[in-house]
Image (cartoon, grey):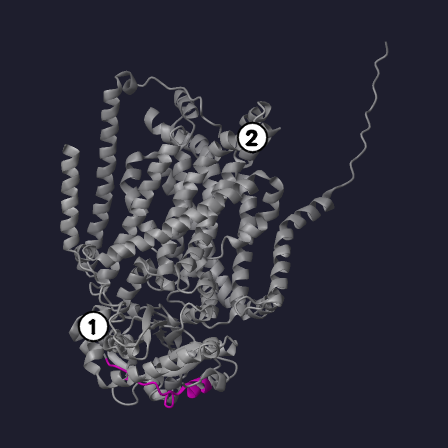
Amino acid sequence: MKKALAAIAIGAAAVLALSGCTDSAAPSATSTATDDPGSGELTTVRVAALPIAETGALWAAMDEGIFEAHGLEIEVVPAQGGANAIPALLSGDIQFAIGQPFGPIRADLQDLGVVIVGNYANSLAEGTDVNAVVALGDSGITRPADLAGKKVSVNTLGAAGDLTIRKAVQDDGGDPSTIEFVEVAFPDVPAQLEAGTMDAAWAPDPFRAMIVGGGGVSVVAPYQATIPGLTVLTNITTQELLDSDPELVAAYAAAMSEALEWAANNEAAVRTAIATNLEIPEEAAAGITLPEFTWDLAGAGIEELGALAVEFEYIEGEPDYSRLIQQQ
Amino acid sequence: MTLYTSTVVTPRKPSRVWAKIGENTAYALGLPILLLVIWGIWSSISPAPFFPSPLVIAEAFVETWIGPAFVNDVLPSLGRLAISIVLAVVLGIAAGTVIGLVRWLRELLEPIFEFFRAVPPPVLIPIVAVLVGANDTMKVVVMVTGAIWPVLLNTIEGVRSTDSVMTETAQSFAITRSERLRFLVLPAASPRIMTGVRQCLSIALILMVISEMFFSSSGLGYQIVFFQRNYLIAQMWSGIVLLGLIGVLLAVIFGFVERRVLRWYHGVKEVERA
Amino acid sequence: MTATADAPVIATPATSRGSSHFRRQRRLRTLRKVVLGLAGIAGFLVTWQLLPTLGVVNPAYFPTATDTIAQLFALSRDLEFWRNVGRTLTSWALGLLIATVLAVVLGTIIGLVPFLRRATHTTVEFLRPIPSVALIPLAILMFGYQLQAALLIIVFASFWQVFIQVLYGVADVDAVARDTARSYGLTRGAQIRSVVFPTALPYLMTGLRLAATVALILAITAEMFMSVPGLGRAIMIARESGQWTTVYALVIVTGVLGLLVNIGFRAIERRSLAWHQSVRGEEVL
C-alpha cells in the first residue's frame, strides 16, 4: 500500500513538473514544412552556419517560407568554427556551408575541390563596419599605426582578420611585422581584454559593442580600411555536388539569392530572428550592425584578399579563381 | 684414496650481444614498418586528400620541423611539458599519499575533485587564463591539473591497498609512522603509482596540444592546429608523427626509470616465476 | 603484491559486539562521508561566490554562484536541456562501452602473449599520446557532423586508459597462483577466468574510472567542436551570444555528471572488488 502511494505521488510530481516545462527547441528547426499545399515533396538540404548574428538572414528567410517555395527544406547545422565545415562538406554530410572565404582559398590551394557558389554577406564600405579592432579606453591606442609592437587578438590566426589588420597598419605607416597576434575566440574577447591578455582585439558585434559601450575605443575597421565591402561570409559547396546534382545547387542558389535580397529589405524580421534564435534580448539584437546581405560576388573582394595574402606571404601563390569561384 | 680434483671446463657461449640488439630493434620497428607499408600501398591505390602517402608526410616532416620551427615551437613546448610532468608526479604522489591515508580528507575533497575532473579543458582554459594570464603559466597549470589525476588516483588506491598483514606487523614492531610511510606504504604502492605515472605522461602530452589551442601563437600543439585549420594536411600529419615520436621517447625514458625504481618488485616477480 | 585471499579476520571490538552495532557504525560512516562531501562542495561554492563579488574577476563575464544556480533551475524546466543531457550521456555510454570491450579483449590477448607485447610496445607508445582533438577533422571527414564522428574521438581516447591498465593487470598475475592453476590442469579459458581475471580486475576498475571521466570530457569536447547535438554544443551556442550564466550553468551540469559517473563507478567497483584488500580494508581495520 505504502509503495503504491509513493509511486502515485512520484508520478503526480513528475506530471506537475513536466507541465511546467518549456521546450526551447520547439519553434526552431522544424519550420512550416509539412503544411504546404501544392509544392509536393521538399528536398532536405543541410547547411552549416555559425550560431552568430549574421545567420539571422537565413533564419528569417526560413520562417518566411522562401526556401519551401523553391522546394527546399533547410536544416541548419550550427557549426563551430568554419574550419571543420570543409571536411564536413567533403564527407557529404552537409551540402552547403556558410563561412568566410579564406578557408576555401586555402582549400583550393590543396586541390580539395571546394567551390564558392555565391556570396552571403559583405561588410560595409561606409559608416560603422560590422567588425573592428577595439582597445580599452586607457590603452593609448587610437590609430592603426599605434598597433605596431602591441598584442592584437583575432579569432583565427592566418586568415582575413590579421591579414587586413596588417595591411591597415602598414597603410597607416606602422610596421606590421612587430605586431604579436594571438588567437582569442570572439566570446572571450571582452573578458580577456579586460584581464590584459592582449592590448587590442578584433571583434564583431555584440562583443565590439560591449567594449566600446564600456569605455573602449574603436581603433580601426580593418575590412573597411583595406578592401571596403569585403565579404564576411560566402556560400560554399563542393565541386562534387555541382557535378552530381546541379539541379539542387540551382534551386539552392535561386532560393538563397531571393532570401538574401528579401533579408536586405526586411531588417526588422532579421533582428527578430536573431533575438529568437540566439536567445538574446530585443535591445541587444537592435544594436547589432548588420552586414550587407547579397548573393552577388561582384563586390566581394575575394581576389583582392588572395592578392593581399600572397603579398604578406600567408599563401605561396594565388588560388585558381575560375575553379574556386563559380557564381550560380 | 686420492682426492680427485680437476677444473671443470665449460665451453664459453658465443657472444649474443648483437643478436639481442637486433632482436630488440626488430620488435621495436617491426609492426610500425608493416603498418607504414600497408598505408603506403593503400594511399597509392586509392589516394584520399586527407591521407597522403608516408613519403609525402616524411618530406613535410623534414621541411617543417627540422629548422627554425624546432627551436621556436618544439623546444618551448617540450620544456613546458617537462615541467608539467615533474610537477604532476610530485604533487600527485604527495597529495595522493596524504589523501589516501587520511580518510576524512579524502571524503571531503573527493566530490570536488571528481566535479572538476569532468569539466572539459576548453571551458576551463579561459577561466584559468583570466586568473593567471594567458601565458606559459596558464599552459603549465592546465597540463598539471589534467595530468595529475592518474598519478593521484593510482597513489590513493595503492596506498589504501597496503597489505594489512604487513601493516599490522609494522605496528607490532612499533615502527614509527614516517618510517612506515617510507619503508612500507610507498614501496608497496609503487607498482600502482608507476602505472599512474605512465598514464600521466600521455595525458600531459595531449594537454600540451590542447593548452596551445587557445590564446597561443606558437608551440608544437599550436602548429598542428594551425595546419589543420589551413588544410596543410601533410604538415598536420607530420606534426602528429612528431607527437607520436615524442610519446615513444617519453615511454623509453619512463621504462628506464621504472626499471630502476621497481627493481625490487621485478626481482620478486622474477623469483616467483622461476 | 600477493593476493590477500587468506588475510586473517581479526576480532576487533566492533565485530565482537554484534552485527547491529556494525550496521550502525557503517551508517554513521556513510553519513560522515556525505556530510564531508557536501562541506567540500559548500566551501567551493563560497569561494566561487566571493570571486566575482570581490571583483577578482568581472561579474559580467564570470557570474556569481547564485546567478548561475538560478539559471540552472531555469534550464532544468526546459525539455531541450534534458534532451541534450540524454544525448551527451548516450554518446558517453556508447563510447565507453566500445572502448572498454576493445581494450579488455585486446589487452588480455596482448598481455598474455609475450611476443605480442613486445611487438606492439612501440606502436602503442606512438599512438597513445596522439590527442583525439587532433583527429577531429579526420573524423568529420569520414562521418560528417554525426554521432559516429564523436564516437571515434571518444573511443580513441578512452581506449588507451583501459588498455594500459589491463596490460599491467594481466602482467601482475601471481606466479604461484598461475602455476597452481596449471598443475591442477585447468584449461586456458578457466585459467583466464579464475586467475588472470581476478588479478587484473582492480587494475581494470581503476582504468574504467579514469576512462569514464575521459569519455565524458571528450563527449562534451566533441560536441563543442563537431556540432554534434548535446550539452557541449549548447555551451558553445550560449558562448557565441555571450550568455555566461547559461554557459556556466551547463558547466556545472557537466561537473555534476562527472561526479555522478564517479560515484556510480565507485559503487560498481565496491561490488565487484568486495573481496579485495583495498575495499575490505575499510571494514576490518
Q: Position of residue B154 (x, y in %)?
A: 42, 40
Q: Given the current orientation, which residue lies at the most extreme right position? A: B2
Q: Residue B127 placed where, x, y %? A: 30, 60
Mark 1 or mark 2, whichever is nearer to me:
1
Q: State left or right for residue B106 relative to residue B79.
A: left
**Local secondary structure at mark 1:** helix
The residue located at (60%, 65%) in the rendering is B43
Q: Is residue A229 above or below residue B101?
A: below
Residue numbers of the magenta segment: A289-307
Label tally: 2
Q: Give x and y (percent) for residue C285.
A: 34, 25
Q: Can the viewer see residue B150 in this picture?
A: yes
Determine the secondary structure under disc 2.
helix
Q: Nearer the viewer, residue C137 or A172?
A: C137
Quarter of the image where one finds residue C207? top left
Based on the displayed image, in which of its 4 quarters is residue B214 positioned? bottom left
Q: In this view, does A260 lie above or below B37?
A: below
Q: What residue type is labelled 2?
A: Val
Percent across and percent down for residue B114 are: 32, 46
Q: What residue type is labelled 1?
A: Ala
From the image, tell me which residue sits under label 1: A275
The answer to whether residue B202 is above or below residue A285 is above
Say which chain tag 2 marks. B
Left or right: B135 in relation to B269: left
Residue B268: which numbered mark, if any? Answer: 2
Count neighbours of disc 2 (C-alpha within 10 A) and say few if under 14, some if 14 to 19, many if 20 or more.
few
Does the magenta-highlighted stretch encompass residue C21? Answer: no
